[in-house]
Image (cartoon, helix red, strand yellow):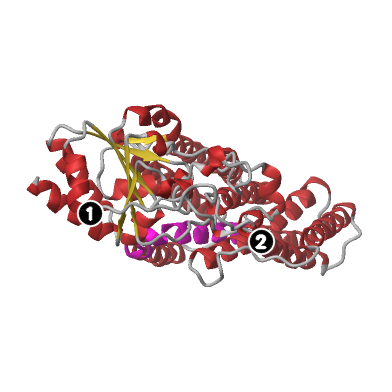
């Protein structure tokens, strides 16, 4: 009777954890509910982890409490100290740790089970896939982290026959996996799968340029979820299967959305090399445009903003680097006091991770209803008096629409060049991640306000108050 009650409590706890994860993930789809969704999902993960550790008697109560304290302290300190510019690095690193954990769990469970009886059939399939996919996600995430942190060059790294070599590694993993499933493996076979998959993960991400990191992060996130689901099958843990499927499915959907937003196919994502063509074709996309740059001042820009009826602000990675999110909020508030309609145009791949600009602006408490996605706002630029581009580059480059020879041709962009006036806040005329010139900078309606984004925004606020 006691055992039945215990089993029922555990089952109910797992159901509650699964519901919390599902509801939390659903709330993450909207900036207005994302914070609450994150808390619900975190509560679900905590409940699932606690129940699993207690149910399986893996550790004692004291060890469980000590682990929670140490892990929780590290997580809180890391989350509070990380700069907004480093958020993509933190996300991809945590994602990699999840993939590595899934791989090691699959591997260790295989070794444990093989001491009792040979591991074959579906269980062996789950072990191979959990180990291989988790390992790919781990080293791929480490390389992505190194590129984002500038420990490695953000430029694509390639060597002759790289794709063929990657394909060979995949074939080796599949062959060894079949051997394990059919019973012809040796004690070293799972370790070889582990090692080859680690190499494959690094080699898949090395050829990818820094500008494609949003797609990479989404893809690696999906792989970690899939690896966790297979690990859950090996461990016979239902909640891990559910959580892994949720993360894998949402990550896959996000990959498709990011790929569409960057005009990338899934083949580009999974087989590497995307971003390399962009870097190789690094010549100016706007070579057919007259190279006349028109500069402006904070005072002149403030006058244009003060007498505008409708202003759209386009944030980019430069805003995050300058930590100017609070300054841009102050500017928006000052404009709204004057009755100006202010919106923020969000490109899906602005920044270095999915949702980077949403997170950045939310940190500055900018109202969610002022954040408008690309598809919803592109039709409004014709009636916009002033567009303020702050640190964005490739996502507003009209060459993506107009120049078939451009590496970014076909990529959906924010059509800011259709506005009556465009003010670009930028440090210099340097190129963006794509490594190409921006034709927007030379348009008749465009003015360049050079300088650090935060300082420029602060100057704009001061000048606006004086108008």
For the residue carrying disc 1, how many other residues have a C-alpha within 10 Å: few (<14), some (14-19), or many (20+)? some
Which image quadrant for residue 20?
A: top left
- Secondary structure at badge 2 equals loop
Which image quadrant for residue 28?
A: top left
Q: Is residue 5 visible?
A: yes
Residue linked to disc 2: 207
Q: Quadrant of the N terminus?
A: top right
Residue 445 x %, y %: 35, 41
Residue 38 x %, y %: 39, 44
Q: Main secondary structure of the magenta part?
A: helix
From which residue to which does the magenta span run?
78-103
Q: Is residue 262 left or right of residue 380?
A: right
- Secondary structure at badge 1 equals loop
Identify the residue at image location x=48%, y=63%.
Answer: 60
Q: Quadrant of the C terminus?
A: top left
The nearer-to-camera label among 2 and 1 is: 1
Cβ atoms under marks 2 and 1 closer than 8 Å: no
For the residue carrying disc 2, how many other residues have a C-alpha within 10 Å: few (<14), some (14-19), or many (20+)? many
Q: Is residue 54 above or below residue 386?
A: below
| Magenta highlight on residue 85 | yes
| Magenta highlight on residue 449 | no
Residue linked to disc 1: 297
Q: Is residue 425 left or right of residue 120?
A: left
Residue 115 x %, y %: 78, 64
Residue 404 x %, y %: 62, 41
Q: Is residue 142 above or below residue 426?
A: below
């Amino acid at each position: 009777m006691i055992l039945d009650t215990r089993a029922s409590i555990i089952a109910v706890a797992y159901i509650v954890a699964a519901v919390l994860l599902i509801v939390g993930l659903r709330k993450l789809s909207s900036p207005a509910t994302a914070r609450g969704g994150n808390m619900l999902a975190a509560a679900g993960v905590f409940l699932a982890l606690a129940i699993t550790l207690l149910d399986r008697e893996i550790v004692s109560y004291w060890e469980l409490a000590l682990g929670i304290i140490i892990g929780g302290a590290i997580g809180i300190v890391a989350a509070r100290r990380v700069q907004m510019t480093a958020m993509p690095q933190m996300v991809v690193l945590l994602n990699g740790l999840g993939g590595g954990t899934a791989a090691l769990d699959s591997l260790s469970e295989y070794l444990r089970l093989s001491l009792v009886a040979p591991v074959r059939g579906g269980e062996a399939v789950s072990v191979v896939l959990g180990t291989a996919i988790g390992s790919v996600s781990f080293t791929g995430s480490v390389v992505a982290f190194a590129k984002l942190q500038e420990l490695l060059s953000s430029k694509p790294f390639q060597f002759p026959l790289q794709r063929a070599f990657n394909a060979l590694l995949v074939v080796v993993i599949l062959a060894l996996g079949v051997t394990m499933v059919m019973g012809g493996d040796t004690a070293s076979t799972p370790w070889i799968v582990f090692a080859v998959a680690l190499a494959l993960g690094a080699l898949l991400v090395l050829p990818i340029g820094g500008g494609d990191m949003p797609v990479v992060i989404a893809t690696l996130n999906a792989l970690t979820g899939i690896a966790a689901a297979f690990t859950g099958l090996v461990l016979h843990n239902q909640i891990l299967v559910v959580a892994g499927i949720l993360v894998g499915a949402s990550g896959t959907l996000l990959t498709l959305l990011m790929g569409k937003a960057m005009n990338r196919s899934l083949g580009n994502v999974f087989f590497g090399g995307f971003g390399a063509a962009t870097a190789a074709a690094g010549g100016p996309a706007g070579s057919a445009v007259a190279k006349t740059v028109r500069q402006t001042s904070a005072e002149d820009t403030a006058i244009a903003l003060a007498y505008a009826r409708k202003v759209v602000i386009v944030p980019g990675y430069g805003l995050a680097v300058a930590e100017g999110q609070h300054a841009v909020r102050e500017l928006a508030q000052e404009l709204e006091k004057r009755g100006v309609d202010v919106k923020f145009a969000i490109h899906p791949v602005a920044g270095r991770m999915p949702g980077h600009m949403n997170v950045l602006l939310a940190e500055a408490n900018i109202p969610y209803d002022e954040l408008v996605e690309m598809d919803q706002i592109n039709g409004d630029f014709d009636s916009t008096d002033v567009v303020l581009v702050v640190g964005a580059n490739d996502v507003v480059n009209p060459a993506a629409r107009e120049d078939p020879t451009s590496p970014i041709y076909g990529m959906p962009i924010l059509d800011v060049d259709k506005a009556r006036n465009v003010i670009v806040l930028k440090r210099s005329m340097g190129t963006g991640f794509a490594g190409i010139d921006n034709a927007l900078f030379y348009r008749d309606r465009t003015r360049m306000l050079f300088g650090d984004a935060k300082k420029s925004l602060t100057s704009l606020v001061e000048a606006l108050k004086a108008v």
